[in-house]
Structures are given as C-alpha cells and as structure tokens.
Image: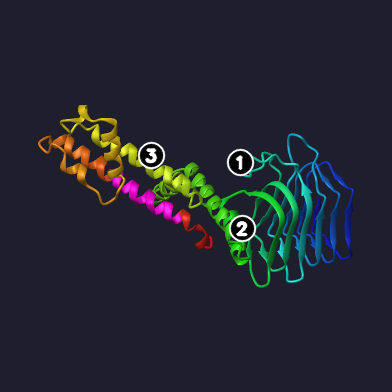
C-alpha cells in the first residue's frame, strides 16, 4: 500500500506481479509513471491520486481464472498536462451477442474531473465504470479499438456524449440504447419505487420491446403486427359479432389488415350494440389495439430516422 506518498521522479513497474490487492491512497505522481507488462492478481485501487504527467498502463493482464483483477480509480486528479494512457490491456474476453464480456475485469475511473487526456488503445476488458466523472475544459477521452461494456447507465451516458462530441452518430446511438436498457434494469431492482419511477420503467420496457430503443425498425414492424393481431383477436373474441362462427380465414385476414390502418373503424359498425357488457369490453380491446398500432408506426419511423437523432 502506498499512502500519502509523492513520487518526484519517474516511476516504472516493469514485469511486476502483484499477488495481493494494491492500493495507492493520496499519492501524487509528479513525473511519468509506467505500468508495463504488469500482472495484477487482485484489485489495483487508485484513491485520490494526482497524475501530473504521462501515466502509461501497457500490456496489463491477470492470469486468475476465477477472479479477474480490476483497476480502480476514485477521485483522481487529471490536470491540463495529465495524460493517462491505457495500452494493450487484453483479458481475452469471450463476448456474447450484446458485445458484453463474460469475465468481470474492470477499469473504473469514478468521480473524476477530466481536464487532461485519457486514452484507451487496444483495450479488451469486461466493464468500464465512469460514474460521476466529467470532461471539462480541454479534457479528452480517446478510444481506439476499445471493447468494454458500460457498468451502469451513467457510464453509457458519458460514452454517448463523448461520441456525440466526436460526431460519431452510430456509436452514440448504440450507447444511447445501452444507457436506456441499463437504466431500466436499475429501476427494476430499485426497492420502493414511486408512481413516476414505475411509469418510467414501463416506458423504457415498451421502448425496448418495440424497437430496441430506436435501433431496429424490423423489431418495430414485428411489434406493430403482433400487438395489433393480439388486440384484434381479443376484440372479436368478446362475442359481439353474431356471425363470428362463419368468419373464414380470408375474412379474418382482410379485417385484420383493415384494423391495422389507424383511421379505419369499419369493424365497430358490425358489432351487436345490444350486448352492452361485451360491447364495452370490445371497445376497450379495440381502442388499445389502435393505440398500440399507432405507437408501433411511430417507432418504425423513429428507427428509420435514427441516424438523424445525433444520439439525443
């Protein structure tokens, strides 16, 4: 453990192996600090550390099979001359379809005001956590060949805005979808949710199901067709039609297609209005179906226009 230490000269950890957790607490590096070809077999924590010059983390690795070590920064200081560089850190992650690594290796840079420069070059780790951090002044976060899943929605939001600054619309939209999904999951497990939070959760859930937060127009089309079909079936199953037994497959399909047209209300003219209770139930399903179809059409359009949204 390094506590209240000031390194006035260059510091280099080359070929080092840290078997236990490493803590740098209230430490200042006035000149260059290099971690080269270093193995962390446990956590490496930097708490209230000031980097006044180049800090290079290169060829960092962990050879533990069960627990993958993490590099953790909390409330560090990066002034205008600071340059924090992560280079060639590869945990040999196995990525699933969501581009998330199964291993739990992390780089955490939390609660940090970034006035200097942070570079991630050829990085493949499990997660990155930038919660509470912000870029101000001439601060820069640059990522090249970078693979790491955001640990929380705040980190996804950070990376989204950073991508917007670099005019990378595609990446910004990807992080926008991840941000919303992580926020939805956080709301789900939050205890004692109020009405507003429940409404926000349901809104995010519907957005996820309808078009994956604006990412997939195909999913939006499928959502529109299936939700419309569900409410159409529920509507005719209420028993307000005398000739429902005589309804053929072609009749069913034709009426379903008409139902998909938001302004078409022909089906209402065919109901037996003398059946009050079933008529009310029919109208509920019928109107809910029209709402879901209208919402689905909007989601299709939104997904088509996603590259014009700039990730906002």
* Residue in the foreground of this view, choosing between 166 and 81: 166
Q: Which residue is mark 3?
A: 226
Which residue extends farthest front?
A: 250
Is residue 311 in view? yes
CB under 8 Å between discs 1 and 2:
no
Residue 37: x and y in percent read 86, 49
Q: Is residue 282 above or below residue 179?
A: above
Decide whether residue 298 is among the magenta residues.
Answer: yes
Does residue 43 show up magenta in the picture?
no
**Residue displayed at 77% across by 59% down:** 85
The residue at which mark 2 appears reads as 159
Indicate whether 253 appears above or below 88: above
Cα separation between marks 1 and 3: 24 Å
Residue at point 20% right, 30% down? Answer: 244
Label number found at residue 97 = 1
Question: What segment is highlighted magenta in the picture?
Answer: 288-302
**Measured Cα–Cα span from mark 2 to mark 3:** 34 Å
Nearer mark to the viewer, of 1 and 3: 3
Label 3 crowd (10 A; few <14 / some 14-19 / many >=20): some
- In the foreground, 68 or 190: 68
């Amino acid at each position: 453990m390094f506590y209240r230490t000031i390194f006035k000269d260059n510091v280099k950890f080359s070929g080092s192996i840290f078997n236990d957790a490493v803590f740098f607490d209230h430490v200042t590096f006035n000149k260059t600090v290099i971690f080269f070809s270093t193995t962390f077999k446990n956590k490496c924590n930097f708490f209230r550390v000031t980097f006044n010059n180049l800090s290079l983390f290169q060829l960092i690795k962990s050879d533990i099979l069960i627990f993958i070590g993490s590099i953790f920064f909390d409330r560090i200081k990066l002034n205008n001359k600071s340059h924090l560089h992560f280079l060639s850190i590869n945990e040999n992650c196995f990525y699933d379809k969501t581009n998330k690594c199964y291993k739990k290796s992390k780089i955490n840079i939390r609660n940090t005001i970034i006035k200097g420069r942070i570079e991630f070059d050829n990085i493949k780790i499990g997660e990155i956590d930038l919660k509470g951090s912000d870029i101000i002044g001439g601060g820069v976060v640059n990522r090249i060949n970078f693979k790491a899943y955001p640990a929380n929605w705040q980190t996804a939001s950070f990376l989204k805005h950073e991508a917007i600054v670099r005019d990378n619309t595609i990446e910004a939209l990807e992080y926008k979808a991840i941000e919303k999904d992580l926020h939805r999951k956080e709301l789900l497990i939050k205890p004692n949710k109020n009405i507003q939070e429940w409404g926000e959760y349901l809104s995010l859930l519907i957005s996820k199901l309808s078009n994956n937060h604006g990412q997939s127009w195909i999913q939006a089309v499928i959502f529109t067709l299936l939700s419309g079909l569900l409410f159409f079936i529920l509507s005719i199953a209420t028993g307000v039609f005398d000739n429902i037994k005589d309804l053929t497959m072609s009749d069913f399909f034709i009426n379903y297609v008409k139902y998909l047209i938001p302004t078409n209300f022909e089906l209402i003219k065919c109901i037996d209005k003398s059946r009050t209770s079933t008529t009310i139930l029919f109208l509920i399903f019928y109107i809910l179906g029209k709402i879901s179809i209208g919402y689905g059409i909007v989601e299709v359009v939104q997904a088509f226009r996603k590259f014009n949204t700039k990730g906002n």
